[in-house]
Image (cartoon, grey):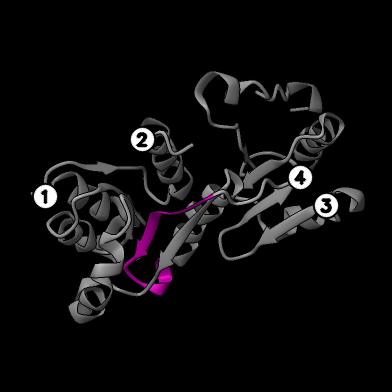
Amino acid sequence: MSEADVVFDFDRASRIGLNEAVFCEGKSAEQIAAILKDAKTRGVGLLLTRLDAGKLAALPEELVADIDYCLLSRTAFCGPLQPARINGKITIVAAGTSDSGVAREAARTLRHAGVQATLITDVGVAGLWRLMERIDEIRRHPIVIAVAGMDAALASVLGGLVDGALIAVPTSVGYGASEGGRTALNAMLASCAPGITVCNIDNGYGAACAALRILTILGAR
């Protein structure tokens, strides 16, 4: 691949209300730099996902200087960032601290779109009291993103406790039988709690985009 292979969709927001993000996994540092230089020329801020520290270090210094990087989520903001203008609409609930990277990816995706989410971590059902201590706070949000690996029971439990839109994200966290997140995915898809939307494994970005679409329908964006 060369820089010429990159055709970035700068007009996506005008069509669907969501900006294209730069999925960095599988792209070379040169290809990522080409996108960022084009965005800088246009005065556009971008969200980068799955950007590992080594690839970040390989980018030109003048681009790195303009990047806000989060190692935990492997996300970055490059260029101008719009102020947060929406708060209190979305909460991201992560079962364990091991799920925090995916949860943080969702939060950073929302923040790039001008939405400040509430992040609640380490409330998995293995210690149900932790979740119940926060349940009233969770219920105050019309949109809940549930992030969980292993048996992913958190999604079903929340599905029976909250009345808002529930978006579930399985993670690849867990031992052998967890099968890299497939057990969590199947558990969420097979949940007896009705109306749960399920995203791909480790796809915090996709969950955030689903939440943004709901906000648009609610007239909150």
Q: How many marks?
A: 4
Residue drawn 61% across the image and 44% down it: 25
Quadrant of the snapshot with the N terminus: top right
Read off the residue under disc 2: 218
Q: CA distance from mark 2 to mark 4?
A: 26 Å
Determine the main secondary structure of the stretch shown in magenta: strand
Residue 127, percent from left and from top = 21, 80
**Residue 172 visible within the image:** no
Query: Which mark sits nearer the N-terminus, 3 or 1?
Result: 3
Segment tinted magenta in the rendering: 86-99
Residue 19, percent from left and from top = 59, 32
Mark 2: few, some, or many residues within 10 Å (few <14, many ≥20)? Answer: few
Secondary structure of the residue carrying tag 4 is loop
User: Is 95 placed above or below 205 here?
Assistant: below
Residue drawn 67% across the image and 52% down it: 76
Read off the residue under disc 4: 80
Residue 168, percent from left and from top = 30, 50
With 206 as the anchor, is 51 left or right in this view?
A: right
Is label 3 in contact with label 1 (beta carbons under 8 Å)? no
Q: Return the mark for residue 66.
A: 3
Check disc 4 and give the amino acid type. Answer: Pro
Query: Which mark sits nearer the N-terminus, 4 or 1?
Result: 4
Q: CA distance from mark 1 to mark 2?
A: 23 Å
**Residue 66 visible within the image:** yes
Mark 3: few, some, or many residues within 10 Å (few <14, many ≥20)? Answer: some
Q: CA distance from mark 3 to mark 1?
A: 44 Å
Front-lying residue, 24 or 135: 135
Check disc 2 and give the amino acid type. Answer: Leu
